[in-house]
Image: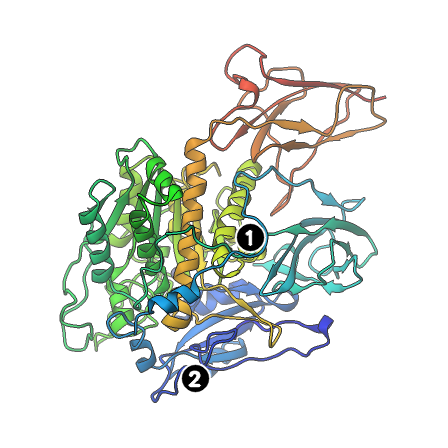
Amino acid sequence: MRRTASLSLAGLSTIALAGSLLVQGPGATPAAADSGPPIAKLVRIQVPSTADVQRLEAAGFDVAHDVSSGKDGAIEATVVLDGATDVSALTARGAKVLSTLDGPTRAEVNAQRKGVATPLTAAEKAALAPKSGGSSKSSGKPGGSRPPVVSPKGTLTVLRSDTWTTEGTRMVSLEVRSKAGPTDTVTATTDTGQTLRLSAFVDRGVYLYHRFDEPQMVDGGATKVTVKSADGTSVTAPLQPWTSGGTTAYPAGFQWGFTDDGYVDATQTDAVIEKLAADRPDLAEVIDLPNPTLGYPEGSRYKAPASYPRGPLTVKAIRIGKHRDGSRTGVLMYSQEHAREWVTSLVAIETAQRLIRNADTDALTGSLLENLDIFIIPQVNPDGSAYSLYDDPIQRNNLNDSGCERPDGNLTNRGVNINRNFSVGSLFDGYVGATFTCGSNFAGKAELSEPESRNETYLTKTHPNIKFAMNTHSYGGYFMWSPASYRPDRTTLPRPSLGTENYFFAASEKILSEVREYRDTVVWPGQTGTVVDVLYSAAGNSGDETYYGGVNEPTSGKPKVYAWDFEVGLPRWDKATSSWQDTGAFWPEFRDEGFSQAMEFANGWYGIFEVAQQYELDKTAPTSTPNVDGRGSYAGPVDVLWQTSEPATIYYTTDGSRPTLSSPTVQQDGVRGGALPVTLTAKRTVLQWFSVDEKGNIEGGYDPSGTSSKGLNREVIKIR
Ligand SMILES: [Zn+2]
């Protein structure tokens, strides 16, 4: 497995795990023995830096999404090799092989397809239904930013200190920035006396922060940690709950578990959405996207059944809502840009069916349909996914092999990586994380050269009401937003403001709690955030395209669309071995694991709808409270910080002038940091401010472009 726990505290040795990917982590039984070679090897490697990962990609190696910082700043990644390729191909390039996992055999993979797989019975599904347990549900619109936790001289800043319990085990995740940089030795000691060591996270030579390479077990009674630098400086931070706890049963009568019979090609996802639209034309319609794909090829070497269409194919989307006229907040959800990420189109058709089949009976579903205009593309890349399903499961790209042709017509690792073919922060603009050469990260011949990419931008361009989007991938368990690309010197696309970043984290609380409610799986806080801060750079990805509204060199980090990326397939905690285990990589055994992944992320998609609905209905202005007031006077320079009632941006002036939307704003204290204080040093300062939430509601009814001071906050701060 890719993750092995560091268990020094428990006194256990590190456990190296190996076996078939069809062995499903906690409690599952191994798949039946099967003859024939594995379709792929998943090789977990360690290299000194992310630049080495990109060099491997440029050399044609197929690197999966789950890149992470391992021990002491080294980078760990998973390389997908053809089952027949020897790992010496990697060691020859300086990679250290940590573990090798054989993928399933061809016969095992074929047995997971719809029409071949044995559908789950009603009783089996009932056994997999979530049951209520743990604490209460997430409260909706959570509070504003957390106050910064900084050591006296600013040597150490605790960026995040999160805790949760999963599979009965309490976990902790810490992120700490040290002024001394990556060479500092940073430790954390809980109030129960447990000590943990953090590793430096360095990306392309830039130190970001110290963290664990994966969440660590922590004593059940721990409530805070004292973080210490090598020079003895320390600071204490409370452990904060990460996502609301436990599982939650679906409401009585809620229809779910539609995708119970195996992995599907695009004709099968199309059949589902056509039926939904035919049954409920009042609620849904199918949209034929305007750019046909190249198509699945003719010829006897290609193994899709005769019933699968050859030649150019129309990609289809379903539009769902009671008011599909642009008057409601639009939400664009799309799956399987990457062909081999089979679970992701199940998430799409499961969610579409939940929305339609519960429309008249479930109160939440009914209100989502009233308030939102939902667009779902179950399969962005149907040609590639058919090739992955029927010919070679490791296929990631589309089937456009122009300039990459092999004499025998083998299309494996040919084609264009759709999630590198977009126009914002692209390889062609000088951003990192795609290649000009054929391979799994091939950016194509030009920005938006592929019909699959242009179909996505068609929807966002023709429906300006789209304000939220989700790009669902597999695997590794991530929840991310923009920016997702940087230049070789690690200059990123513009970052969100502090208010927007806080909004994203608040939405994470809601959305990831919904994922958790299915079977208590938790997306780690260390895998939640901007792509560049938790993962890597992916030049020309569709999340950035949507977030920045297709603006090629964006100058603002203000989102045109709140655009997210999911990676389904969360690592799960195995109590028996006290380690995190992967759950089947791209091809989880359907009945044991693939079905459940689809259910938990359909929950997550509902969570996104709930966040979007809250946005649609939000007419409540934020309020703000500073940590200072004008009564009396202060002894020295004053650091002003505000608490807000919800994620919001604070605009302020210190010269007595009326603040406007062009005035200074409270800034973020670096990567993943909290609010930077506004420091006042004058003997007398007239501090005036107002706050604005993400919807644009303004505190106190203040009019920033007017002349009245009605609703404006004001304090006169005096220093002795
Ligand atoms: Zn992907």
Can residue 663 be seen by looking at this rendering?
yes
Q: Which of 318 and 101 is in front in this view?
A: 318
Measure the alpha-carbon separation of dots 2 and 1.
33 Å
* Residue 603, horizontal then vertical, whole percent: 43, 53
- Residue closest to the far front: 252
Above or below for 660 versus 33: above
Quadrant in the picture for residue 631: top right
Would you name the residue on which mark 1 appears?
Answer: 533
* Residue 425, horizontal then vertical, whole percent: 42, 48
Quadrant in the picture for residue 319: top left
Mark 1 secondary-structure assignment: helix
Q: Which amino acid does label 1 sit on?
A: Asp
* Residue 188, horizontal then vertical, whole percent: 75, 59
Above or below for 689 versus 213: above
- Residue closest to the far top: 708
User: How many numbered discs, if any?
Assistant: 2
Residue at 52% across, 48% down: 508
User: Where is ligand 1, by quadrant?
Assistant: bottom left
Can residue 425 be seen by looking at this rendering?
no
Would you name the residue on which mark 2 appears?
Answer: 86
Badge 2: residue crowd in 10 Å (few <14, some 14–19, many ≥20): few
Q: Is residue 489 left or right of residue 89?
A: right
